Image (cartoon, rainbow, N blue to C red):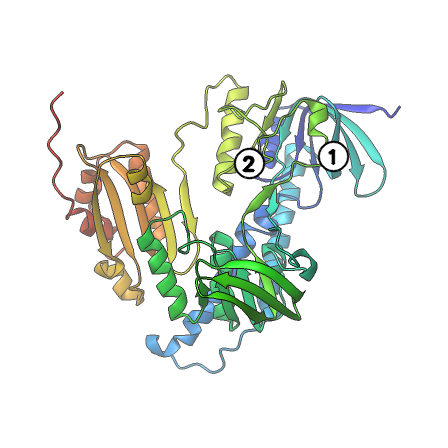
């Protein structure tokens, strides 16, 4: 029987939560091991958040170059070199991986490259990438298993070898006609980027609007943006079957209110959600239960159904954001030291990095109505913000929901340039329990996007009279 190496902390997966818990515990003197299949640092620095924003920024530069005359500039060629775009992204990823490796060395955590499978409670067998196996036990085990792109059960889809976000970010050529299935964050961000590089793009969405979880005015604004950039959008459209080979030629048979038709394209991108990496790694051998969707069951302290085992990040059920995974790490870290932190009532910001950006923190109108919460609404176009005039970026709007009987901020949505910075300001006020009047009366620098909050909030309707008890 192979010898078992024992560690005080065993981390499965080196994503956002996993790497930080490993570095923290190792620095505190606890013998720590991290098992990672492939991506040092997880998906964010390698194949997801940061690489996608790198590509998106290149697409924004390409878009601005095409508008050069609008800014008084005379340029030569504005041709896009996709190999150069990918090279810039790859250099960033390589630099980030090296930073991660340096942090592992500095922390003292042992990084083991291989695939782990549980063979008993808190014991895994690791098939090493370099060959051979190791058996490793942990006094405490932390799961940071992540998710992967979901592949819908559509006839012919898997056989045509469609791209997910991973392959799309590695393209060194420009698709002639990219067909995108799904209109969530990944689908919309990459659709716009590829269109700006020069590809023809068609987006297929089965729902009634783009960004289906947002308010109808958000969906309408996104649709108008995409149509203005020459992106074909098919709403309330279901994919029936796929034929061909992505990267060469694909035929996508769809059904909408007018019946069936076939779309012809060169490439296919699937962006229909995420599925957890929890199958086939022996979690049942360790007493770790999953929910009906395959995510690890956790309580509000991120404890699993097995003693001394925690799950963090995407595999614990989302929301699927790096900033949420980092907060998961903070909750577990603090509770290991006697804290009482939980995931209850977290104020999670949402951001889609289209151009302009779409952001939200707190409730939107749809959620407030569904919950029967009365609110006051104030909304202005981004063209009312003088900063946008200086940038020639007038598209979009911002709006805020304020409690009907108090000055509490319930939620904020913005679709516009520099919207992420606006959201951070509002989120800070919400975290502090501050009334909207504080933002209304603040002196913000002129001309900045934040200054627009004063413009927005001067028009808040009066409070409702409180009802008698």
Question: In this orientation, does residue 417 appear?
Answer: no
Q: Residue furthest front?
A: 259
Mark closer to the chain start, 1 or 2:
1
- Residue 314's place in the image compared with 384, above or below, is above
| Quadrant (top left/top right/bottom left/bottom right) for the C terminus | top left
Q: How many marks?
A: 2
Q: Which residue shows up at 47% across the image and 70% down it?
A: 62
Q: SS of the residue at dot 1?
A: strand
Mark 2 neighbour class, 10 Å CA radius: few under 14, some 14 to 19, many 20 or more: many
Q: Nearer the viewer, residue 149 or 53?
A: 149
Q: Which residue shows up at 60% across the image and 21% down it?
A: 305
Q: Pinpoint residue 11: horizontal percent, then vertical percent.
A: 66, 31
Q: Residue furthest right?
A: 1
Q: Is residue 223 left or right of residue 114?
A: left
Q: SS of the residue at dot 2?
A: helix
| Quadrant (top left/top right/bottom left/bottom right) for the N terminus | top right
Q: Is residue 95 left or right of residue 458?
A: right
Q: Which residue shows up at 81% across the image and 24% down it?
A: 4
- Residue 24's place in the image compared with 113, above or below, is above
Q: Pinpoint residue 282: horizontal percent, then vertical percent.
A: 72, 30
Q: Pinpoint residue 39: horizontal percent, then vertical percent.
A: 66, 46
Q: Is residue 145 left or right of residue 444?
A: right
Q: Residue 313: give its label.
A: 2
Q: Nearer the viewer, residue 116 or 93?
A: 116
Q: Residue 116: give its label.
A: 1
Q: Residue 82: give its label.
A: none
Q: Nearer the viewer, residue 338 or 188?
A: 188
Structural distance between the alpha carbons of marks 1 and 2: 18 Å
Mark 1 neighbour class, 10 Å CA radius: few under 14, some 14 to 19, many 20 or more: many
């Amino acid at each position: 029987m192979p010898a078992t190496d024992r560690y005080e902390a065993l981390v499965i997966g080196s994503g956002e939560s996993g790497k930080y818990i490993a570095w923290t515990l190792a620095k505190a003197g606890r013998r720590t091991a991290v098992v990672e299949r492939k991506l040092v640092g997880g998906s964010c620095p390698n194949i997801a958040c940061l690489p996608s924003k790198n590509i998106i920024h290149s697409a924004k530069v390409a878009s601005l170059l095409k508008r050069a005359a609008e800014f008084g500039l005379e340029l030569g060629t504005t041709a896009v070199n996709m190999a150069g775009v990918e090279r810039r992204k790859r250099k960033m990823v390589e630099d980030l991986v090296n930073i991660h490796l340096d942090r592992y060395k500095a922390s003292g955590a042992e990084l083991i490259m291989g695939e782990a499978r549980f063979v008993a409670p808190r014991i895994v067998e690791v098939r090493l990438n370099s060959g051979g196996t190791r058996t490793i036990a942990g006094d405490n085990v932390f799961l940071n298993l992540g998710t992967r792109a979901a592949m819908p059960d559509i006839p012919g889809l898997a056989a045509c070898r469609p791209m997910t976000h991973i392959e799309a970010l590695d393209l060194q050529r420009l698709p002639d006609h990219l067909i995108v299935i799904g209109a969530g964050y990944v689908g919309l961000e990459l659709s716009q980027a590829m269109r700006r590089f020069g590809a023809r793009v068609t987006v297929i969405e089965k729902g009634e609007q783009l960004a289906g979880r947002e308010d109808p005015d958000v969906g309408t604004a996104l649709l108008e943006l995409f149509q203005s950039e020459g992106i074909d959008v098919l709403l309330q459209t279901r994919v029936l079957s796929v034929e061909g080979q992505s990267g060469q030629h694909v035929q996508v048979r769809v059904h909408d209110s007018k019946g069936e038709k076939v779309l012809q394209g060169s490439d296919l991108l699937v962006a229909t959600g995420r599925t957890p990496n929890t199958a086939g790694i022996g979690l049942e051998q360790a007493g770790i239960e999953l929910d009906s969707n395959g995510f690890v069951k956790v309580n509000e302290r991120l404890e699993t159904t097995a003693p001394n085992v925690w799950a963090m990040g995407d595999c614990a059920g989302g929301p699927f954001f790096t900033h949420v995974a980092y907060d998961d790490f903070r909750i577990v870290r603090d509770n290991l030291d006697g804290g009482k932190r939980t995931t209850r009532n977290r104020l999670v910001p949402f951001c889609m990095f289209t151009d302009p950006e779409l952001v939200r923190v707190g409730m939107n109108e749809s959620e407030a109505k569904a919950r029967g919460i009365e609110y006051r609404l104030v909304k202005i176009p981004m063209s009312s913000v003088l900063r946008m005039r200086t940038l020639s970026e007038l598209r979009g709007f911002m709006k805020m929901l304020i409690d009907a009987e108090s000055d509490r901020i319930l939620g904020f949505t913005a679709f516009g340039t520099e919207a992420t910075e606006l959201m951070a300001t509002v989120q800070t006020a919400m975290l502090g329990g501050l009334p909207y009047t504080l933002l209304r009366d603040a002196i913000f620098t002129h001309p900045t996007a934040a200054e627009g909050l004063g413009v927005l909030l001067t028009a808040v309707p009066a409070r409702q009279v409180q009802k008698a008890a």
